[in-house]
Image: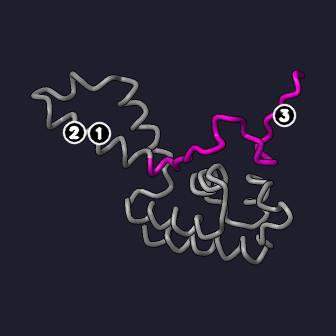
Amino acid sequence: MSGEEEENAAELKLGEDFIKEKCLMNGEVAMILERRLEQMQQLSDDAMNTIPQVFEKSLQYVQKFSRYKNPDAVRQVREILSRHQLAEFELAVLGNLCPETVEEAIAMVPSLKDKGRGLDDDAIDKMLNDLALVKRFD
């Protein structure tokens, strides 16, 4: 190796590209793409002919795999997760995968257990319960 640190998501070593970037949950990407689709349809007489296939497939994907369909629910999820001072990567993974137990959350995002973050099992459990409430009313 050339002195560069190896990337490791479990330790939040994500590489230079992720240092200051915002990670989006599938629901957030769906909202952005849906708004863009509306704009494209307003600007074109025959919008279905002007929509690139990759755009259409991307929209279908994020709509299918978004755990939260309602824009208000998507905003609430980001707000709940943001309260816990998670890294953007952690926030996006938890918001997309919606673990139900503390053990699942830690298995999906091992960095949650980093010492000094104030996220003990009870805090993680409360966060997951808050997310479950949003999902129930979505």
Q: What residue type is labelled 2?
A: Gln
Distance CA(mark 2)–CA(mark 3):
42 Å
Residue 61 - label: none
Between residue 101 and residue 93, name the one nearer to us: 93
Report the predominant secondary structure element of the magenta stretch.
Answer: loop
Say left or right for 85 vs 36: right
Residue 5 - label: 3
User: Which of marks 3 and 2 precedes in the sequence?
Assistant: 3
Q: Is residue 26 magenta?
A: yes
Q: In this view, does 65 lie above or below 16?
A: below
Q: Residue 35: x and y, percent? A: 29, 45
C-beta proximity under 8 Å, tags 1 and 2: yes
x 76%, y 77%: residue? 122
Report helix, strand or loop for mark 1: helix
Report helix, strand or loop for mark 3: loop
Front tag of 2 and 3 = 3
Q: Give the residues drawn in magenta, as a range.
A: 1-28
Say left or right for 111 vs 129: right
Q: Identify the image quadrant of the C terminus.
A: bottom left
Residue at mark 2? 39
Please rate how many residues cluster around mark 2, counting C-alpha atoms within 10 Å: few if below 14, some from 14 to 19, many from 20: few
x 37%, y 49%: residue? 31
Front tag of 1 and 3 = 3
User: Which of marks 3 and 1 precedes in the sequence?
Assistant: 3
Q: Which colour scheme is used?
A: one colour
Distance CA(mark 1)–CA(mark 3):
38 Å
Distance CA(mark 1)–CA(mark 2):
5 Å
Q: In this view, does 2 lie above or below 87?
A: above
Residue 36 - label: 1
Q: Is residue 27 above or below residue 14?
A: below
Q: Residue 90: x and y, percent? A: 67, 54
